[in-house]
Image (cartoon, rainbow, N blue to C red):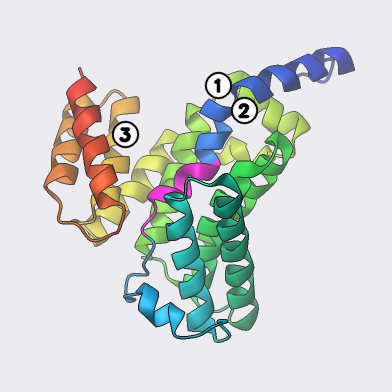
């Protein structure tokens, strides 16, 4: 953003960006909804979490965070949904505090932060968006082939690139989002393709790589990825929704 922009102009740009944020940065912080909620080696069920009235161990905390995000995604009551996301963030932060040297806590914190940010304003969403990236990178540092963290970073790059140039400039210049300048379509492709390589039958990986192909004009690759998503077996609670999204988006693809 040029340094000669005046305060009134900057204020107008911020108001304009806020109006358009729901289709841009809101998508960025919501991206974690499509990230696999289980770790590559973990199978988590509601019963396994419910056995403890209040989670206290590292495993119980990250599993409870994952479950709270999953429950919140389909909760229609806004207050209940926000409470679930806040609880998920708290659990995940406690998990990381107990064991910062395991990838699962960082991954589920990135996911919880993305959901918590949905109720915040633009400046806070940028802050949370940066932390989402930081936590996903922390997970990858500990487990370089963690498919969930790879997925998060792939879609993070894609959602930044989907923002308008003005929105990115405002976020970088006025909202503390300088790291947004590191995003690229090539990184989005790299991360998502690696997630697909590691978990080729995970529907959400196929769906989001299809969207990236679509948005980078790789239409034939997008069609193939959408079809692979539709054919993938169900492995996550929200797969029925994502499968229908794949069907609808493939139908619209030209």
> Which of pointers 2 and 3 lies earlier in the amino acid sequence?
2
Q: What distance separates the C-alpha of mark 1 from that of mark 3?
A: 17 Å
> On the image, numbered disc 3 is attached to which residue?
211
Asked whether the viewer can see residue 116, the reply is yes
User: Residue shown at 52%/72% (left/top)?
Assistant: 105
Distance between mark 2 and mark 1 Cα atoms: 6 Å
Residue drawn at (16%, 28%) of the image: 220
* Helix, strand or loop for disc 3: helix
Q: Where does the C terminus fall, quadrant-wise?
A: top left
Return the x and y of residue 56 as percentages of the image width and height.
Answer: 58, 85
The residue at the far front in this view is 77
Q: Are marks 2 and 1 in contact (CB under 8 Å)?
A: yes
The kind of secondary structure the magenta stretch mainly shows is helix
- Which percent across, then down, holds residue 248? 22, 29
Q: Choose mark 2 or mark 3, whichever is in front.
A: 3
Task: Kindly identify which residue carries mark 1.
Answer: 164
What are the residue bounds of the magenta stretch? 29-36
Q: Which mark is residue 168?
A: 2
Q: Secondary structure at mark 2?
A: helix
Cα separation, mark 2 vs mark 3, equals 20 Å
* Residue 170 rendering spot, x and y as whole percentages: 70, 26
Describe residue 230's horizontal placement relative to residue 195 as left or right.
left
């Amino acid at each position: 953003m040029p340094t000669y922009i005046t305060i009134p102009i900057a204020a107008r740009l911020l108001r304009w960006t806020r109006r358009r944020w729901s289709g841009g940065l809101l998508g960025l912080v919501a991206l974690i909804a499509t990230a696999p909620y289980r770790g590559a080696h973990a199978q988590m069920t509601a019963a396994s979490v419910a056995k403890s009235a209040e989670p206290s161990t590292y495993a119980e905390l990250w599993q409870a965070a994952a479950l709270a995000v999953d429950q919140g995604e389909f909760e229609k009551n806004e207050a209940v949904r926000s409470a679930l996301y806040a609880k998920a963030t708290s659990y995940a932060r406690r998990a990381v505090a107990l064991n910062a040297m395991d990838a699962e806590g960082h991954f589920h914190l990135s996911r919880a932060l993305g959901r918590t940010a949905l109720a915040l304003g633009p400046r806070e969403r940028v802050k949370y968006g940066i932390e989402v990236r930081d936590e996903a990178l922390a997970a990858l540092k500990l487990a370089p082939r963690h498919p969930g963290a790879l997925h998060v970073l792939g879609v993070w790059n894609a959602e930044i690139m989907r923002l308008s140039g003005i929105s990115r400039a405002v976020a970088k210049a006025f909202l503390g989002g300088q790291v947004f300048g590191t995003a690229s379509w090539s990184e989005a492709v790299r991360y998502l393709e690696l997630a697909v390589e590691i978990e080729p039958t995970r529907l959400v990986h196929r769906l989001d790589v299809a969207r990236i192909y679509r948005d980078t004009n790789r239409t034939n690759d997008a069609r193939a990825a959408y079809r692979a998503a539709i054919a993938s077996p169900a492995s996550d609670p929200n797969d029925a929704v994502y499968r229908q999204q794949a069907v609808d988006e493939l139908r619209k693809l030209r």
